[in-house]
Image (cartoon, rainbow, N blue to C red):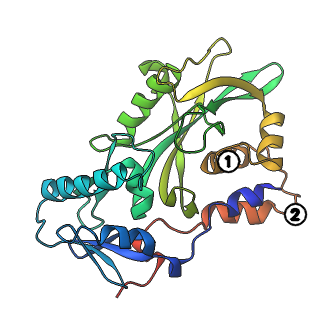
Amino acid sequence: MSFLDRVRACARFDPSDYRPFVVEGEVVGFVEPDFGALLAAFPSVFEWTSGRLELSSTLSTADQRTVAVEAALQQLRTRGLLGGWRDEPYPVLSSRTETALLTVERAAVPRFGLVASGVHVNGFVRSEQGLKIWVGRRSLTKPTAPGKFDQLVAGGRPAGYTVRETLIKEAAEEARISDALIRSAQAVGTITYATRQPEGLRRDVLYLYDLELPEDFVPVNTDDEIAAFELWPIEQVIETVRDTDAFKFNCALVVIDFLMRHGHLDPDDADYVAVADGLRSLPVASARLMHVP
C-alpha cells in the first residue's frame, strides 16, 4: 500500500456504468441502471429510459419535487431497498443559478450520484515532542465506514447551512470545540472527487481547514458519531495512512493533503509527483464527467 493507492481509491469512476439524472433539463446526478429501474416503479415522479433518469416535468417547484421524491424513497426504505436513513435533507443545487431544485435524504445522495459538500478539520498540536494530530475513530453504528479513522471534525453540509455555519455546528457536535476556537481555523482549500463506494457514487466537495490547538485541549464527542479520540504523533499518522486502509477513504486524502502542505512527504519519494498531481486531478464532481445528449 502507499499514499498513491489512497489517492487512486478516490478515482474509481467509469462513466459507462451510469445514466444521467436530469431535473429541469439539467444533469444533476448519475444513477446506476438497477437503481433507475427501481425508480421506474414511480412513474408520476420519475421517467426512466435506457439512456437517462428524469424527474417528471409535472413537478414544477422545489417543494413539489422534494415531497414526491421523499415519498418514493420512503417506500424503498420500507421495502429494505434504501438503508442508512438519516433524516438529513441535502440540497440538489442548480449549477446555473445555485438555487435548490429540491432536497433529498442524505442516504440517497450517492444512489442518485448527486454532488454533496462537507467540512474536514485537521486538528493539530505543536509540542516539544513534535507535531501531533487529533484523530477520531468513527462509531461502529455509523452507516458509512464504521470504525474507520477520521479527522477531528468532519461533516456534511445539509440544506440551509453555509460552509462556515456547517464548520461551527460540526465542531460543537463532534468535538465540543467552542465557537471562539473554531473561528481561528484556517481555510486551506478544497478536495473534489468522483468515486464508486459501497453506498453509491460519491461526488463530493470537501472544504478543508487547519486548526492549531493548545496542548491541554481534549475533544469530547456529543453526537455519538465518534467512538474515541486519540492524539497521534505525526509519524503514526504517516505510517497508518501510507501502509493501511484504516482511515475512511476521503479522510485519508485530507491527511495526505495536510502532510504535503506541511512538508511531511519526501520529494525524493518515487510517488511524490504522482501523489501531488493526483490530489489535483481527481475526477471533477460535475456533469462534465460524461457526455450527456
Residue at 42% x, 21% y: name it.
179
Numbered circle sitting on residue 18: none
Q: Identify the residue at image location x=55%, y=17%.
A: 220
* Residue for point 35% across, 34% down: 165
Picture coordinates of residue 101, whole percent (x, y) = 22, 60
Q: Is residue 63 left or right of residue 49?
A: left
Percent across and percent down for residue 226 are: 57, 28
Tell me, for residue 252, which label it has, or none: 1
**Mark 2: few, some, or many residues within 10 Å (few <14, many ≥20)?**
few
Q: Is residue 152 above or below residue 91?
A: above
Instruction: Identify the image quadrant of residue 167.
Output: top left
Give the residue at the far top of this rendering: 216
Residue 29 location, quadrant: bottom left
Callout count: 2
In front of the other: 285 or 208: 285
* Quarter that holds the N terminus: bottom right
Image height check: is 212 above or below 20? above
Q: Quadrant of the C terminus?
A: bottom left
Residue nearer the viewer, 38 or 14: 38
Q: Which residue is mark 2?
A: 270
- The residues tagged by marks 1 and 2 sit, at their Cα atoms, a distance apart of 19 Å
Tell me the amino acid under the disc marked 1: Ala
